[in-house]
Image (tube, coloured by chain):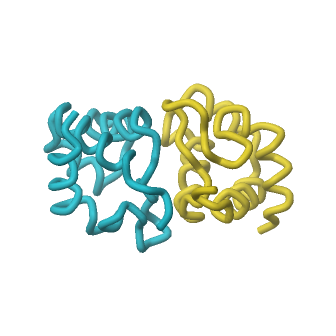
Chain colours: A cyan, B yellow
Amino acid sequence: ANPEAGKAKVEAVCAACHGIAGISASPAFPNLAGQKEAYLQAALTAYKDGSRKNPIMGNLAAGLSDTDIADLAAYLSGLKRCE
Amino acid sequence: ANPEAGKAKVEAVCAACHGIAGISASPAFPNLAGQKEAYLQAALTAYKDGSRKNPIMGNLAAGLSDTDIADLAAYLSGLKRCE
């Protein structure tokens, strides 16, 4: 996977809710920094195929390719869980 | 909510997959330590009512009351995200 490509996507899209460093500002949105890579990939894939339902994530994930998902999971799982 | 009651439940059940400190040993199971309290509550409730499907979590959550869920979310969100 290509974490650099993941970084660009996070900063363009995901950071709005999940925070630029993957620690979200809102209690409703999960922290993603340092989350398990395989879990992130499974969650994004589930949002994409609709097996996990969320109005925001469903729409966003629909536009992601499997490569995008792998890149995002690689980047986010590499972020430090705390400062 | 009662984090102490949450702690007892985590150590009895959740720790098996999610780790005693909420950092899971397996890449398939998400870290829970320091995750957002409202998100944890929403996720557990979704597993309980079946709107989020997972064979393991569905069965485990079925046995949880809303109080249990609140206690678990309070305890887990309070755990440090890193050593």
Which one is in front, A12 or A64?
A: A12
Residue at the image position 27 percent from the left and 64 percent from the top: A15
Which residue is outermost to the bottom?
A25
Residue B64, position as x, y percentages in the image = 75, 45
Question: In the image, is A11 to the left or to the right of B1?
Answer: left
Q: Can residue B41 be seen by looking at this rendering?
A: no
Residue A43, position as x, y percentages in the image = 38, 39
Residue at the image position 16 percent from the left and 62 percent from the top: A12
Indicate the quadrant containing the C terminus of chain B: top left, top right, bottom left or bottom right: bottom right
Residue at the image position 68 percent from the left and 40 percent from the top: B19
Which one is in front, B6 or B17?
A: B17
Residue B27, position as x, y percentages in the image = 49, 32
Question: In the image, is B44 to the left or to the right of B52?
Answer: right
Question: In the image, is A66 to the left or to the right of A17?
Answer: left
Residue A3, position as x, y percentages in the image = 23, 44
Indicate the quadrant containing the N terminus of chain B: top left, top right, bottom left or bottom right: bottom right
